[in-house]
Structures are given as structure tokens and as C-alpha cells.
Amino acid sequence: MANSSEHIFVIFGASGDLTKRKLIPAIYSLYVQKLLPENFALIGVSRTALNDESFRSKMKTALGEFNEIGDKSFEDKFLQNVFYQSINTENADDFPILKNRIEEIRKELNIGGNIIFYLSTPPNMYGIIPQNLAKHKLNDESDGWKRLIIEKPFGYDLESAEKLRDEIMANWNENQIYRIDHYLGKETVQNLLVTRFSNGIFEPLWNRNFIHHVEVTSAESIGVEGRGGYYESSGALRDMIQNHLLQVVSLVAMEPPSSLEPESIRNEILKVIQSFRSIDKNDVRNVAIRGQYISSKIKGESIIGYRDEDGVAQNSMTETYAALKFYIDNWRWGGIPFYIRTGKRLPTRVTEVVIHFKHTPHFLFKKNGAPNSHNQLVIRIQPDEGILLKFGMKIPGQGFDVQTVNMDFHYSDLSVGRIPTAYERLIHDAMKGDSTLFARTEEVMGLWKFLTPVIEAWKDEKDIPLYGYPAGTWGPERADDLIDDPNMTWRYPCKNLTDDVLYCEL
Ligand code: BG6
């Protein structure tokens, strides 16, 4: 029987981008911090013909480019425990080759039977690989645990996600499956829980009595960056909202868990998702806005439109921007709107949650020209990670003029040094068997179910507009109309947490 942490880490899709950009740098960072078990090996698997040496050399180059931790002195030693096996993962008959290789390495390095299989392949392989592993008993836990880490997207819609679930669950148990959503690995996303549940001042206000609405934005300034082929079958709703943004909403909206046990937290997350009010398909045009970036000039540089990107159809109807208004039907949030939006080629890269509080019951200072201002708490997930509270203060001098001022905290002020990357945190958690930050089957199905009316309406109802927006702008202006209160708009955040102007310096 294996010791509880030693294991072999197998990456399917090892010749792909994610492996070199994120996985290898994250695992190397764990190695440098001595967070990998003493007996450990990594086997890269894909169809590409490589051997141990050529794979190591590729990974060395990758670390040269994407090393997260800075310290390069352990690279060669780390790579000694990295191996490569080429197989055709579609073909079950190739799996004995992998099985034998795992056995060989286990014996050579004295590693027990624990194995993690990381699926970083195109999504159409997520059903097949677990099946093929099971055919050769590589799911059998009699000699040590076997875990599957599965990248997103888990399915394309509710139906395909259910099919994939059934294919995988035919041979694997829920506690063997780790569905990764890298947003949950972000330090600042986890800090949502700490902000809410470790401070006496926020939680009493965190409900429909004091909050006017909640806004979540995840903007990117980049376009599809050569991933046009993938993005065409995805779009902003599937790529960002179905997973990252709605997971963030769940953490903002969940009830306090009774403990930090994974199931205790995941049960609360599931309850929120189950309380999302169903969207009526006929109402989609009023509560969801889609857009697609068109060519424009940013700082004198011409930016091509989405339809001119590689791998994108000239008449593509894929949305690169999506905004949604919805409600959570429970005691805490009844009647409070949630507004979420995401898009590519927006003015800046920023992800944040804004809690807009209700205004005071009576505007004492209105006559003096004070704006009817609402306090805002901005929780910045990236960049310039931190928290900003906006509130009114008297302008010194005659009368009672009020202006909104900022109180801000920046993570960079903490002297903890480096913030671990999301992949580092999540891979380490999976190695420890901690599933808190991974999405459970019912959560993923619940999120697909919630978005089904929008997916269907955008597919079937051709008269629902797909607004063009010039690259470098905040998306379709029509998204402003989603916000019910005519005196309120989305926040227009900049790179710096404390700045908000319509067009910030890039
Ligand atoms: C990925 C999406 O899941 O998240 C990408 O597929 C997106 O399209 C990325 O660019 C954003 O992640 P981050 O961590 O840069 O906000």
C-alpha cells in the first residue's frame, strides 16, 4: 500500500499549451517549495512522438519562459523525475503501454499505487480517456488512490454535460473526480470567503436589506489569441460565465458553511446555484445581452474584428461579450438583482465584484448638490488585487457638500511575498485529496441548467441582436439598460483599483 501522498502524476495532452504554460510551471513551483512528495514522478502523455529526453528539453524551455517562482536552480533535478509516453489516447489497446510504463517507473522510483490523471486534452477526449483507463483497471484503488483532474469545459450544454457525466461515472466515483475551475484557485477568490466570514462588519449587511445590487465583471483586453477554433464552439457565455463568473457569484451569495470541510462549503455553493431563478426563454432578450468585437484602432494600432481572427467564420454569431441580469430566490437575496458581464477586447483586464449598497433612507444633503450616492464595496480579484470601499465625506468649507472618497487595501501591501498561482494551489489540493475548490457534478449540471434558456434563445431566435462593439470599448451600450436604476451604471474599472473612468489608460 502506498504512503498517502506519494504518487505518479500523469498529464494527458502533454504536448499542448496548457501543460507548458501552466501545469509544468505550477508543479515546478510546488517542487521548489518542497510541496511535492519525496517519491514523485510526472509522466507526460500525448500522441506526439517524443521521448523522455526530448520532452524534458521542451519542458526546460517552457520553464525558461513561464517559470512562476523565479528560482531556476532546481530545474534539472526536477526534470529528472519527468518522463514521457506517446500513445494514441483514443485507442484502448494503447493503454497497456502506458500501464507498463507506469509500473516500470513505480518500481524504479519506489512509488506506490497512487496516481493522478490530468486531462488537459481537447474536451472531446474527456469521456474516452477515463473509459480507456478503466478498461485497463487504472481506476482501481486497491493498491492506492486514483484521481482524475478534468479541465473545463465540462460539456457544451446540459445534455452533453449529462452524457459526459454518465460516461465518466460509469467507472469512477465522485470522490475521485476533480473538476478544475482555475478561478477557484485564485487567492483573491478564496479571500471572498474570508472577507465575508471573518469580519463582523460585513456579514450583517450582506443581504437584501442593505444591498441594492451586486455586479461582477471579468473583462479582458486581449482577443481570442489564436484560439478562434475553440472559441467558435464556445463563446463568452460558455467560456467564462458558465464556470468562472457564476462560481464567483456563488461565493459572494452563499450562506456561511458550518465548517471548512469540503462538503460543508460545496453544499452551500450548490444551494445557491439551485436558488438561481430560472430565466424564461421568452425573456432572454430583456435580461441577456450579447456582443462581438469589431475592428477598431487602439492607440493608433489597428485591431482586427473577431470575424477576421484565424479559425473564425466570416458570419460567426459567437458572442465575445455577454452580460446577464438574474435573481437568486432565497431569503438572503430575494428581489436583489445580480448583474454579470464578461468580454474580450474590452478596455482593460480586470475581474472584480462590486457590492452596491442601498442609499440612506433620507437624503439630508441633497440640496447641497450631493449626489444620491450609494456606498460601494469593490472586491478586486485581479489585477491590483485588493478591496476598495467608496463612501461619502464632507467637502471642507461652507455648507454640507459631500463627495465620494476611497478607502483601499492592496494585496501588494502585505509582506507575504509571492501569491501562489491558481494552478499551483489547485494541483496541490488535488494531490492532498482536498476537493473544496473543485466543482461537484451537481454544481456543473446546475449551472448548465440555469443557462439553458439563454443558450437556446441565442441559438434559435435569430432576431435577438448580436451587437458589434469596437475593440477597446466596454461592449454594447445596450448592456447599460440592463441596470434598472436610471441613476446607476456599471462600474468602469481601470487597472488600478481606485480608478474608474469610462476609458482608462491602457
Ligand atoms: C479561461 C478562458 O478559462 O480563462 C479564457 O478559456 C480566458 O478564454 C481565461 O482568457 C481568463 O483567465 P484569467 O485567469 O486570465 O482571468
Image (cartoon, rainbow, N blue to C red):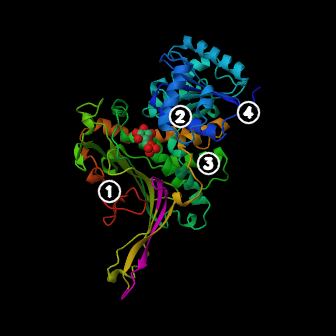
Q: Residue furthest bottom?
A: 398
Q: Label 4: which residue? A: 4
To which quarter of the image does residue 204 belong? bottom right
To which quarter of the image does residue 305 belong? top left
Q: Label 3: which residue? A: 265
Tell me if mark 2 has few (under 14), some (14-19) or many (20+) residues whose alpha carbon lies within 10 angstroms of its own. Answer: some
Tell me if mark 1 has few (under 14), some (14-19) or many (20+) residues whose alpha carbon lies within 10 angstroms of its own. Answer: few
Would residue 182 be visible to someone looking at this image?
yes
Q: Is mark 4 within 8 Å of ligand 1?
A: no
SS for callout 3: helix
- Mark 2 → mark 1, Cα distance in angstroms: 32 Å
- Mark 4 → mark 3, Cα distance in angstroms: 24 Å
SS for callout 2: helix
Verify CB contact (< 8 Å) between mark 4 and mark 3. no
- Mark 2 → mark 4, Cα distance in angstroms: 22 Å
Q: Label 1: which residue? A: 505
